[in-house]
């Protein structure tokens, strides 16, 4: 047998440029964190439905009646998810960074309980004295001055433990720490005698001690951070109406392609950065104390859209109409607001949640759950525009993006419209019903990213601006489809939680966005000659397609013809060697076809061996010849095409699923059935094992067509060598 070139030249068919292994980058870490948020977020839709329906039933029935108990039970079932988001986030983050280990999730619960128990043991409550608000002392926050007091609003009940109101932040840190402990200590063995506590049993024990310094860090820095976030939330509320919503959506929508939008909106939805009900009441009391006739809600919009503007006396009169209210008659504004906050603390779980609520979504769920003690209209007239980081989605989810789908469909040639009608209309209806936009949004990103950033993002931001300016207090769970609108818009309106302008202003925004989206996309697709489904293919793209495409630009294609190298491939040993010549492109250096110094001549010796070979041994002869011929034919047929596609980032490519890899590596150009290729590759592997040749373990079922051909070629080379 002859070897015409060096082995490193033989592997030119699949040679790739490999990056040095390094730790995960910040983008990978943040992307994993964003995916971790999806687990608790996915629970919120059903919880929101229970909360909204239960609140409606409870508000429309007599207290302590059968209907009231049913409604209260349903409401509590939904409210429990929103009330325990920190621990849910701790568990989901632990799962995400530990490859979904239940032990890591359990460890996160242990760590969260330990951290909060430590804080609860060191907190000391001090009642309000001489008009001063109640406060807590903690470590060196001894209450000697206003700066060294822990405000009442920074304390909450976490799983029944009175501790710092850290929102989801503490849960995220504890979850990450639990995952680290699991990954590092799950295989740790301990000495004899205490070996029972080794392995996975060691993980919660280690975490128990790891959260001790974490708890002290939060006790030291969170009073400062919490107050800072609260100031930030109040400051954004003073921006011209709708501007905060506009800026929010520009940032949030621009992060969608990277999967980081969940990380961005989490603080605004579930921490003091999104505002606080208690803070809003206290600020209003202080301002009204300075001037009892001061009108807080100084919106520039007409009264019929923004609601009536109220001074303190008018606001109190409206407040006293609530089914459950504090006795505030004859009090000064600041005394009245403190009395309301103290009253909530006596009204069970619903009242406590109102007092503790911070973050745009969390506050709205607390108001829905405590509808007998507060409503959106009263908070609006304190200057708290709830829903400013949520309501805007309904404008482009209900009608905007569906109209964009209609516009793209109308750009399709008439003869093709019928065949792709189902694709567009099913995607549009899904968006309208549930708010899931993946088929439409990721089609923009896949086909023409400028459509997403240059058309869709500005229009989405406009929808948020209009919704914020109209003060539409409609919450949502994950998306903004018609289901969320009914649960968090129509039902709360029926319960008396908001004005009709607030509930149905959403439809005004949606009606305005519909023609904007339609004409913007129709003319953009036409002018940009975007090959939307029906004009080119017949498919809307998903997030997986977009991620596969992001890897595709890394594929290098060789344009110029390169010197060719002849490689002789022989597939059998027991039979007379047949030679086939294939061509392999050599990217940079010229290689001579014949190099006498490197040629290795092997003779097929002892024909007698063949004669002595019994029929049983020679039985595989015919199949081996067929496999050899097929291998040579395939390599000869596809070598030139497939060798032009070189995967630069092999590690990232390997993480893709088989379909995504096939799109990138050129398998689509191979016409042979994949099952046949796998069958012949399996035959070659069996022959190699018979001859005692060691091959790397490979899962043929998970190989693309190209990977199977490369495997067959390399296996044949090893058999012949």
Image: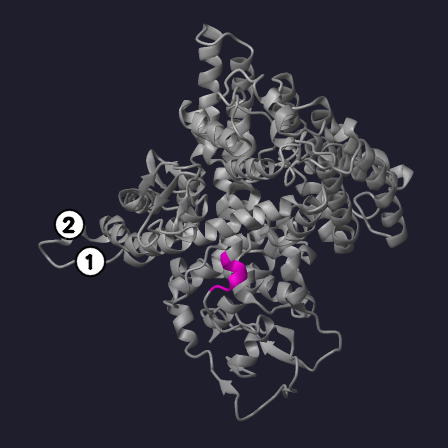
For the residues marked 2 and 1, what is the alpha-carbon distance in whole angstroms? 9 Å
Question: Please, is residue 371 above or below residue 190 in the view?
Answer: above
Q: Residue at x 33, y 39 (%)?
A: 125
Q: Residue at x 52, y 23 (%)?
A: 330
Residue found farthest to the bottom: 597
Instruction: Name the one closer to the observer, 444 or 456.
Output: 456
Give the residue at mark 2.
196
Sort mark 1 into few (<14), some (14-19) or many (20+) by Cα contacts within 10 Å. some
Residue 528 part of the magenta segment = no
Residue 98 placement (x, y as % from top left): 39, 51
Q: Disc number at residue 231? A: none
Instruction: Name the one closer to the observer, 48 or 625.
Output: 48
Sort mark 2 into few (<14), some (14-19) or many (20+) by Cα contacts within 10 Å. few
Question: Please, is residue 325 above or below residue 603 in the view?
Answer: above
Q: Disc number at residue 189? A: 1
Tag 2–tag 1 contact (CB < 8 Å) = no
In the rendered structure, the answer to whether residue 636 lies left or right of residue 89 reads: right
Q: Which residues are magenta?
A: 24-29
In the rendered structure, the answer to whether residue 601 lies left or right of residue 125 reads: right
Secondary structure, magenta segment, majority class: helix
Which circle's residue, 2 or 1, is located before the other in the chain? 1
Residue 230 placement (x, y as % from top left): 52, 47
Residue 165 placement (x, y as % from top left): 42, 42
- Is residue 503 in view from this perspective? yes
Q: Residue at x 56, y 32 (%)?
A: 364
Q: Using the rendered view, name the quadrant where residue 688 is placed.
A: bottom left
* Secondary structure of the residue carrying numbered label 1: loop
């Amino acid at each position: 047998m002859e070897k015409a070139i060096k082995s490193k030249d033989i592997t030119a068919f699949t040679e790739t440029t490999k990056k040095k292994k390094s730790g995960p980058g910040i983008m990978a870490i943040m992307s994993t964190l964003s995916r971790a948020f999806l687990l608790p977020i996915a629970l919120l839709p059903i919880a929101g439905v229970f909360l909204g329906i239960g609140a409606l039933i409870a508000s429309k029935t007599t207290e302590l009646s059968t209907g009231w108990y049913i409604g209260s039970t349903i409401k509590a079932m939904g409210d429990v998810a929103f009330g325990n988001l920190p621990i849910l986030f701790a568990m989901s983050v632990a799962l995400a960074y530990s490859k979904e280990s239940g032990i890591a999730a359990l460890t996160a619960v242990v760590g969260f309980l330990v951290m909060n128990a430590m804080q609860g043991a060191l907190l000391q409550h001090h009642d309000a004295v001489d008009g001063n608000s109640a406060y807590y002392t903690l470590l060196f926050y001894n209450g000697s001055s206003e700066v060294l007091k822990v405000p009442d609003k920074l304390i909450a009940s976490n799983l029944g433990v009175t501790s710092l109101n850290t929102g989801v932040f503490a849960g995220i840190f504890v979850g990450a720490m639990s995952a680290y402990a699991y990954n590092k200590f799950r295989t740790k063995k301990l000495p004899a005698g205490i070996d029972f506590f080794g392995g996975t049993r060691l993980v919660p024990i280690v975490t128990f001690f790891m959260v001790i310094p974490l708890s002290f860090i939060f006790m030291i820095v969170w009073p400062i951070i919490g107050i800072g976030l609260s100031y930030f939330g109040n400051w954004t509320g003073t921006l011209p109406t709708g501007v905060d919503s506009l800026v929010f959506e520009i940032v949030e929508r621009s992060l969608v392609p990277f999967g980081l939008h969940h990380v961005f909106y989490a603080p605004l939805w579930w921490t003091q950065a999104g505002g606080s009900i208690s803070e809003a009441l206290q600020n209003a009391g202080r301002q009204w104390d300075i001037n009892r006739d001061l009108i807080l809600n100084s919106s520039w919009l007409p009264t019929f859209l923004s609601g009536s503007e109220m001074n303190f006396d008018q606001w109190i009169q409206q407040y006293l109409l609530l089914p459950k209210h504090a006795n505030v008659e004859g009090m000064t504004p600041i005394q009245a607001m403190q009395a309301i906050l103290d009253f909530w603390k006596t009204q069970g779980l619903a009242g406590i949640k109102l007092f503790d609520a911070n973050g745009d979504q969390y506050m709205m769920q607390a108001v829905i759950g405590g509808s007998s003690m507060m409503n959106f209209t009263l908070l609006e007239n304190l200057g708290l525009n709830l829903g400013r980081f949520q309501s805007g989605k309904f404008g482009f989810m209900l009608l905007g993006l569906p109209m964009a789908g209609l516009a793209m469909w109308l750009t399709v040639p008439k003869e093709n419209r019928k065949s792709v009608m189902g694709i567009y209309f099913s995607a549009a209806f899904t968006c309208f019903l549930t708010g899931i936009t993946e088929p439409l949004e990721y089609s923009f990103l896949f086909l023409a990213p400028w459509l997403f950033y240059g058309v869709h993002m500005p229009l989405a931001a406009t929808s948020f601006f209009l919704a914020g300016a109209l003060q539409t207090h409609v919450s949502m769970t994950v998306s903004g489809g018609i289901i969320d609108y009914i649960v968090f818009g129509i039902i709360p309106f029926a319960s008396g939680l908001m004005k009709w302008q607030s509930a149905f202003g959403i439809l005004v925004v949606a009606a305005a966005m519909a023609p904007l989206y339609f004409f913007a996309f129709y003319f953009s697709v036409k002018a940009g000659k975007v090959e939307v489904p029906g004009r080119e293919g017949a498919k809307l793209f998903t997030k997986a397609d977009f991620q596969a495409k992001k890897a595709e630009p890394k594929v290098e294609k060789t344009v110029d013809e390169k010197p060719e190298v002849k490689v002789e491939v022989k597939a059998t040993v027991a039979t007379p060697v047949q030679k086939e010549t294939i061509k392999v492109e050599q990217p940079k250096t010229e290689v001579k076809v014949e190099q006498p110094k490197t040629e290795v001549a092997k003779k097929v010796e002892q024909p007698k061996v063949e004669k002595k070979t019994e029929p049983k041994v020679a039985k595989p002869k015919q199949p081996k010849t067929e496999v050899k011929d097929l291998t040579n034919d395939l390599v000869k047929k596809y070598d030139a095409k497939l060798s032009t596609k070189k995967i630069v980032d092999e590690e990232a490519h390997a993480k893709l699923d088989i379909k995504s890899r096939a799109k990138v590596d050129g398998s689509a150009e191979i016409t042979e059935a994949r099952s046949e290729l796998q069958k012949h590759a399996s035959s070659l592997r069996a022959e190699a094992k018979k001859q005692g040749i060691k091959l790397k373990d490979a899962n043929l079922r998970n190989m693309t067509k190209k990977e199977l051909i490369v495997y067959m070629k390399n296996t044949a080379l090893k058999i012949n060598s």
